[in-house]
């Protein structure tokens, strides 16, 4: 069993650039959960990625009190899509 673990594919992505930190992990086929940290904001995001395109997107939790408008949610989704490309 231990030898099989050596060849297990890891689907974790970690990016840390320009004060943006993204840690994402695949928990099911094409379904991911991610921690996105922007300056003074933190988000936990659940998304489905098919052929490098986000099909479903959900903000599960966020730190600090902020008013999430539709435009802000779209901007976070676009930021995540740009980071993943």
Image (tube, helix red, strand yellow):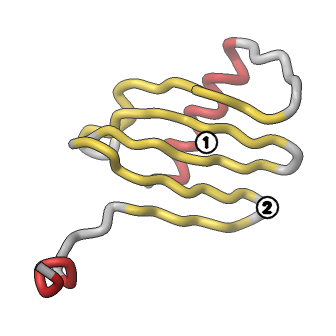
Circle 2 residue: 19
All told, the count of numbered labels is: 2
Q: Nearer the viewer, residue 70 or 11?
A: 11
- Residue at screen point 53% across, 65% down: 14
Q: Residues within 10 Å of mark 2 (few under 14, many from 20)?
A: few
Where is the N terminus found, in terms of image quarters?
bottom left
* Residue sitting nearer the eye, 42 or 20: 42
- Judge from the rendering whether residue 54 lies leftward or rightward of residue 19; answer left or right: left
Numbered label attached to residue 79: 1
Pinpoint residue 33: horizontal percent, then vertical percent. 46, 42
Instruction: Please provide percent x and percent y for residue 79.
Output: 61, 42
The structure residue drawn at horizontal position 61% and vertical position 38%, both measured from the top left corner, is: 44
Which element carries disc 1, helix, strand or loop? helix
Q: What is the x, y in percent for residue 67?
A: 83, 16
Position in image of residue 78 (x %, y %): 57, 35
Q: Is residue 66 left or right of residue 1?
A: right
Q: Secondary structure at mark 2?
A: loop
> Is residue 53 toward the left or the right of residue 5 in the image?
right
Mark carried by residue 1: none
**Name of the residue lying farthest toward the top:** 70
Considering only vertical position in the picture, is 44 above or below 9?
above
Sequence-earlier tag: 1 or 2: 2
Q: CA distance from mark 1 to mark 2?
A: 13 Å
Within the image, what quadrant is residue 69 found in? top right
| Neighbours of disc 1 within 10 Å: few (<14), some (14-19), many (20+) | few
Q: Quadrant of residue 20?
A: bottom right
């Amino acid at each position: 069993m231990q030898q099989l673990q050596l060849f297990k594919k890891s689907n974790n992505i970690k990016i840390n650039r320009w004060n943006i930190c993204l840690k994402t992990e695949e928990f099911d086929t094409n379904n991911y959960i991610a921690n996105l940290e922007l300056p003074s904001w933190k988000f936990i995001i659940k998304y489905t990625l098919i052929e490098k395109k986000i099909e479903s997107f959900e903000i599960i939790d966020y730190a600090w009190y902020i008013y999430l408008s539709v435009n802000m949610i779209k901007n976070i989704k676009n930021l995540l899509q740009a980071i993943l490309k």
